[in-house]
Amino acid sequence: MGKKALFAVGDSVSIHYGFYLKQMINDQFIYARKDGALMCDSRAVLNYLMQENSKGVRYDISLVNCGLHDIRIDRHSGDIQVTGEEYEENLKKIVDTLLQMAKKVIWVNITPVIDSLHNARTKGYLRFSKDVIYYNEISERVMTEQEIPIIDIFSFTKNLGEGIYIDHVHFKEEVRALQAAFISGYLLNCKT
């Protein structure tokens, strides 16, 4: 039996653990993502997937996440980048599109944010843990309704303890490898 085609769509965190994930699943999967590129918020993910679907792009499995950019808050206006209501609608459309493109869709939820660490910066966007939790609840509801399996990287990462970040939102190399191992364990036991 040949390798299955796996396409990953997600944020910079997924790019970081993706390097390790690709190696860990190499014997069973051909791992791909858009030129290693970052997909920002759920709007960008939806637009990209709709374009790819119209081209007839197909995969065995799609591993998808978004939300970390959706919860960005402009520090001057206080506006959130994508409201919870729009996020929910975007996720429904993302799932509908991916179900046309892949035999199996797997959702990876948003990784934790520590308010005091993230928002200590004087520039850039704000993010809050309460929004991560809320948007993860939204995604859980949408994915459960569509019977899409969820990899709970939030809980896994949160339980790794303190000192796991290299900056406001990204993780140390050893944490990235652990996240990849966690996801690969799911994928290697996944039935398509």
Image: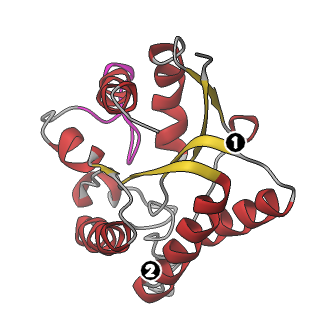
Residue 161 position by quadrant: top left
Residue 115 shows up from this direction = yes
Does residue 168 sit above or below 21 in this rendering? below
Relative to 120, 16 lies left or right = right
Does residue 187 sit above or below 71 in this rendering? above
Question: Seen from this angle, which residue lies furthest front?
Answer: 1
Residue 165, x across and y down, in percent = 31, 36
Task: For mark 1, give the secondary structure.
Answer: loop
Q: Residue at x 58, y 70 (%)?
A: 96
As for residue 97 lying within the magenta part, the answer is: no
- Which amino acid does the dot numbered 2 rest on? Glu
Mark 1 lies on residue: 37
- For the record, the magenta segment spans 164-174
Residue 86, x across and y down, in percent = 51, 85
Residue 13, x across and y down, in percent = 46, 41
Residue 118 position by quadrant: bottom left
Question: Which of the pair 144/163 is nearer the observer?
Answer: 144
Question: Seen from this angle, which residue lies furthest top?
Answer: 27
**Crowding near the residue tagged with mark 1, few <14, some 14–19, many ≥20 C-alpha atoms within 10 Å:** few
Relative to 26, 151 lies left or right = left
Question: Which of the pair 46/171 is nearer the observer?
Answer: 46
Mark 2 lies on residue: 88
Task: For mark 2, give the secondary structure.
Answer: helix
Residue 84, x across and y down, in percent = 40, 83
Mark positioned earlier in the residue sequence (1 or 2):
1
Please identify the quadrant where the N terminus is shown.
top right
